[in-house]
Amino acid sequence: MEENNNVSEELHEEPSMMGGLKSIGFALVMFAIAYYFYYTMTNYENGEAVRMNRILLLAYGILGKNITVGILSLIGLVIGYGGVNEIMQSQK
């Protein structure tokens, strides 16, 4: 029983400034992907030839432009909030 308690304590990470900054950086990457997708899909809808990732093209075909951009932005917001929260917790 003692061994199980030690394992669960080892898995818990303390909030750190670097972890929060990494999360915020990843959130910015998600926003950049959402912007790229919106810009590219707008050009695609206007009849211009574009090159893009097949996964994004599949997402466009299933969900459409606005919903896909909204989902990518929402993921970015949640990750960014987690990063800010981690930075605030590390300051305490």
Image (cartoon, rainbow, N blue to C red):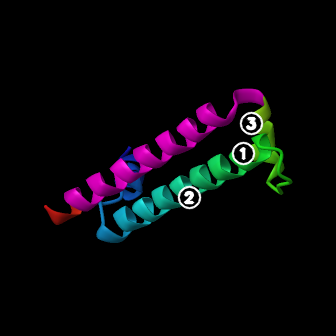
Quadrant housing residue 13: bottom left
**Disc 3 target residue:** 60
Inter-mark Cα distance, 1 to 2: 14 Å
Question: Which mark is drawn over residue 9?
Answer: none
Q: Is residue 63 left or right of residue 86?
A: right
Disc 1 + disc 2, Cβ < 8 Å: no
Question: Which residue type does callout 1 highlight?
Answer: Met
Q: What residue sits 42% from the left and 53% below the top?
A: 7
Disc 1 + disc 3, Cβ < 8 Å: yes
Q: In the image as oriented, which residue stretches furthest toward the left?
A: 92
For marks 1 and 3 on the same chain, the one whose residue lies earlier in the sequence: 1
Q: Position of residue 8 (x, y in %)?
A: 39, 49
Which of the image's four quarters has the C terminus?
A: bottom left
Q: Is residue 14 magenta?
A: no
**Disc 2 target residue:** 32
Question: Which residue type does callout 3 highlight?
Answer: Tyr
SS majority, magenta: helix
Q: What residue sits 52% from the left and 54% below the top?
A: 31
For marks 3 and 2 on the same chain, the one whose residue lies earlier in the sequence: 2
Q: What residue sits 80% from the left and 38% below the top?
A: 58
